[in-house]
Every structure is written in structure tokens, then in C-alpha cells.
Amino acid sequence: MKPYEPCELPLKELDYQRLFAVVGDANAELARYDGLLQGIVNPSVMLSPLTNEEAVLSSKIEGTQATVDEVLEHEAGLLKEGTKYEDIQEIINYRKALNSAQEYLDERPITLSFVRELHKLLLDSVRGQDKTPGEFRKDQNWIGSAGCSIEQASFVPPNPLQLNDHLEAWQNYLKGNDIDLLLQSAVVHAQFELLHPFKDGNGRIGRILIPLFLYQKKKLSKPMFYLSSYLESHRNEYYARLKAISQSGDWNGWIVFFLEAIADQAKSNSRKVTAIMNLYEDMKIRIQDITHSRYSINLLDAIFDKPLFRTTDFIVRSGINKKTSMGLLRMLRDNDVLVTLSEASGSKPAVLCFPELLNIAEGRKVIW
């Protein structure tokens, strides 16, 4: 099979009549979601559960098996050493990459060097760390069943000798504005995946770039729009649509799929964010009624930021002194706001969780 020859950007001869029927709905739903984002005083705290979910689901597309609660349990020291360690570390790295990217983009645009730094962070101390983290590939690779030859491959990315030229063209396309920004984000994501510039981690980097691109272009007020839930639940179609671009040049089919994903995910995210905001407002009143404490907002923000935690970590994150912290946490346990997962023992701190928030984040009732 010959290496894929990327299309020149911006794309020509798209079926705009077909695409604009879908792009309007996607733009409207994303605008509604961003309206909710703009109404949140502390989105990094309140939407921490969505960031965790994105890290888990984007990694799951690539084969990891850990869940949101397992990641939180690991961080709280509840999982046995070695249990899904590499899967969980990949997810933690993904979350770090998401969080650090926002700080970077507040001052600078997306560039190839930025993408390489994200990749280095993503592959730190996990599978793939032997695959030149932070460096674009210099060898020909291909995708197919385990052990297949290049002739048997289902997809062969561009020749490494031309890769840098294609990446420069991709970067230049990011800098400009296409006819519609959501349509452009569909092309940005697919072209990156088809260039397959790294030896490993291309899918996760490509998905991280979706909200970052929309944030850079001021389509989002915060880079907190995560598409992996839809892509993971439509994984077969996701890959089939990308494959159809390389095999038959079907960009229209891919863009329609991507725009429908945006619209559907925006609706889902809006429901989840509304539920989280309502819970936050309810808990603001309830925690004040329970504790009558001047630290009630510190307490509230700390359990939203990490809804499963060691008491020692809570003391550090909340900024509340130990004696007061322990008293406040005891009140919340006595009033069924928090649940004890592991009692304190010797020098080992207790581990608590905030089940109502975890249930919203997981989209199911989690049994503790």
C-alpha cells in the first residue's frame, strides 16, 4: 500500500449545501454550552469531573481500561500498587496535558513546538515512552493488525521525508480562518490523525487539540468542550469516517459526522454542566446550614475539585487548618454529604468521597 498523500488545505469542492444544514445546529448547540461556561465563576473547579471523564474516555479509545473512580481511588491511595498503573498514569498525563495547555494558550497560539511539548507530557513514564516522546517520526509507520506488513496495512501515513512539509501546511491552516470554525476544526482533527506524525499517542493529541483550537479561535470561552464521550461510543464510525477520507477522499462524510458529534456532545455536556451547577448551588446552601462556617466555600470548592480524597490532601488543598478541617469533614459525614471509603488507621489518613458529584460525572449511580 502506498503512503497517504494529504489533501491541500483549505479543502476545495466541499458540498457546502449538505454541510451547512448540519453546521448551523452544531454552532447553536455549542453556543448554548458556552453560555453555560461563561456563567460559571470557577470552571476549573466545578468542571474538574468533566476533565477527568475526558481523560478517561480519550485514553479508553486507545485501549486503556481504567474508570474515573479508579483514577480517583488511585490518587487517594486506595488501589493496590500495580493495579492498572499504566492505564491510570496515561489518564493522569492526559489530564495534566489538558490543564497545562490552557495556561500556554492564554498567551500563545497552537504551534508544532507546542504539539511536541504536549506529546512529551502525554507519554511521560507510560507505554510509548520508548517511542521518541516529543519528536515527530522519522520512519515510515503503518496501521493494521498486529504483525502485518506494510503491504497488508489498512492505512499507511505520509512518507516521513514529506511529513514536515505537511505539518507546516497544517500549522498554517490553523492560523487562518476557514468558512466556518467548526468545519475547520473537523478538518484540523482529521488531517492531524491522517498525518499520524508521532509513533504513538496521535489519537489523544488530536482529541486534546479540538477544544484548544476552538478556545484559540474564541469559539469557546474556556477550552472545556470534550468530545471523547461521543467518539468512544461511536468508535467504529469514527475510525471508518477517517478511513474513508484516505481511501476515497470522502471529506464531506467525515465533516458531517464530526459536526453531528459536536451538536450531540454539546447537548450532553450542557445537561451535565447544568446538573453540576445546580448541585454546587444546592450544596453552597446546605454546607453553610450544616457547618455555619466561614470556610464553607473553601470546603465546597475542595470537594468539587476532588470528590474522592484523603483527609490530609483536603487540608492542603482547602487551606483550612487541620483541627477545623477534621471537624467540618465530620459534620459532612454525619449529614450524609460525604461517605467514608477508608477509615483512618495509625498514620494512614481516612479516605472520603462526595457521591452526588461522582454520580453526575459518571452518568450512573456509583456504589461505594
Image (cartoon, rainbow, N blue to C red):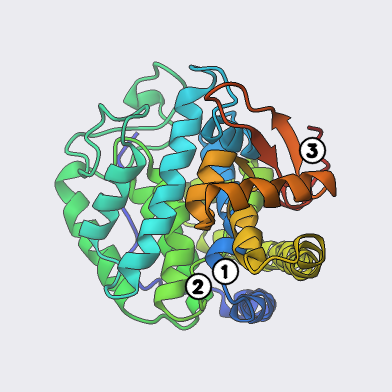
Per the image, the residue denoted by label 2 is 222
When the figure is inspected, residue 25 is found, relative to residue 52, above or below; the finding is below
> In the displayed structure, does residue 25 sit left or right of residue 133?
right
The answer to whether mark 2 and mark 1 are in CB contact below 8 A is yes
Per the image, the residue denoted by label 1 is 43
**Sequence order check, earlier mark of 2 and 1:** 1
Q: Can residue 234 be seen?
A: no
Front position among marks 2 and 1: 1
Percent x, y of residue 326: 64, 45
When the figure is inspected, residue 315 is found, relative to residue 300, above or below; the finding is above
Q: CA distance from mark 3 to mark 2?
A: 29 Å
The answer to whether mark 3 and mark 2 are in CB contact below 8 A is no
**Sequence order check, earlier mark of 3 and 2:** 2
**Which residue is drawn at the image coordinates 66% and 74% (left, top)?**
33
> In the displayed structure, does residue 205 sit left or right of residue 14?
left
Per the image, the residue denoted by label 3 is 366
Percent x, y of residue 170: 29, 64
Quick one: quadrant of the N terminus?
top left
Disc 3 element:
loop
Disc 2 element:
loop
**Sequence order check, earlier mark of 1 and 3:** 1
Q: Residues within 10 Å of mark 1 (few under 14, many from 20)?
A: some
- Taking the view exactly as shown, the residue that stands out farthest to the front is 323
**Which residue is drawn at the image coordinates 68% and 27% (left, top)?**
342
Q: CA distance from mark 1 to mark 3?
A: 24 Å
Front position in the image: 300 or 15: 300
When the figure is inspected, residue 127 is found, relative to residue 301, above or below; the finding is above
